[in-house]
Image: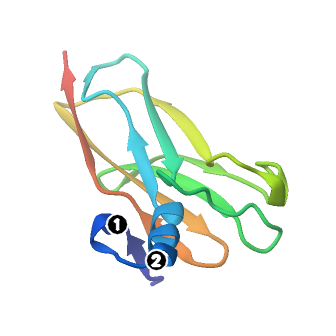
Amino acid sequence: MPKINRYVDIDTIERESKKDYIDRHSPFIHCESTAKAGEPFAVTVKMGKEYTHPDDFDHFIEGVQLYNGETLLAKAEFVAGMLGGQDHKGHATVTFNVVPKGKKMTFVAQSYCTKHGIWESDPVEVAVAE
């Protein structure tokens, strides 16, 4: 089983290079805290908060997956150069539209860096209203 890396609060890290490494590899989930059952609900996953990930031929974000608990809901695959190659200035970002059901959803995102493996977000809970 591959090692899964997780975000660490970078305020506790002293070296700037370590902050950069952790931040740019970590997926962050952005969405509303409540959703309506049966209606499309936007969940955006953005790579990094402050730092952008490289977009080089041999080092790039190859994909992002969105889970509700252990259930895979959606995935997006990227190719090197998608963000403009070595000159890029943006974050790899994808928005998934899911249809909520049940009383709550617990979203977790995973990303895959071709050089540094799998990275997982903190869980984000969303209440689902009827």
* Residue 32 image point, x, y percent: 31, 27
> Label 2 sits on what residue type?
Lys
On screen, residue 114 versus residue 96, left or right, reads right
* Residue 11 image point, x, y percent: 30, 65
The structure residue drawn at horizontal position 46% and vertical position 55%, both measured from the top left corner, is: 27
On screen, residue 7 versus residue 66, left or right, reads left
On screen, residue 5 versus residue 53, left or right, reads left
Asked whether residue 6 is in view, the answer is: yes
Q: How many marks on residues? A: 2
* Residue 29 image point, x, y percent: 40, 44
Question: Are the residues at dot 2 and dot 1 in contact (C-beta closer than 8 Å)?
Answer: yes
Tell me where residue 31 sits by quadrant: top left
Name the residue beneath numbered marker 2: 18
| Cα–Cα span, label 2 and label 1 | 8 Å
Asked whether 129 or 118 is in front, the reply is 118
Name the residue beneath numbered marker 1: 10
> Label 1 sits on what residue type?
Ile
Give the class, few, some or many, for how many residues have Cα within 10 Å of label 1's Cα (few <14, many ≥20).
some
Mark 1 residue element: helix
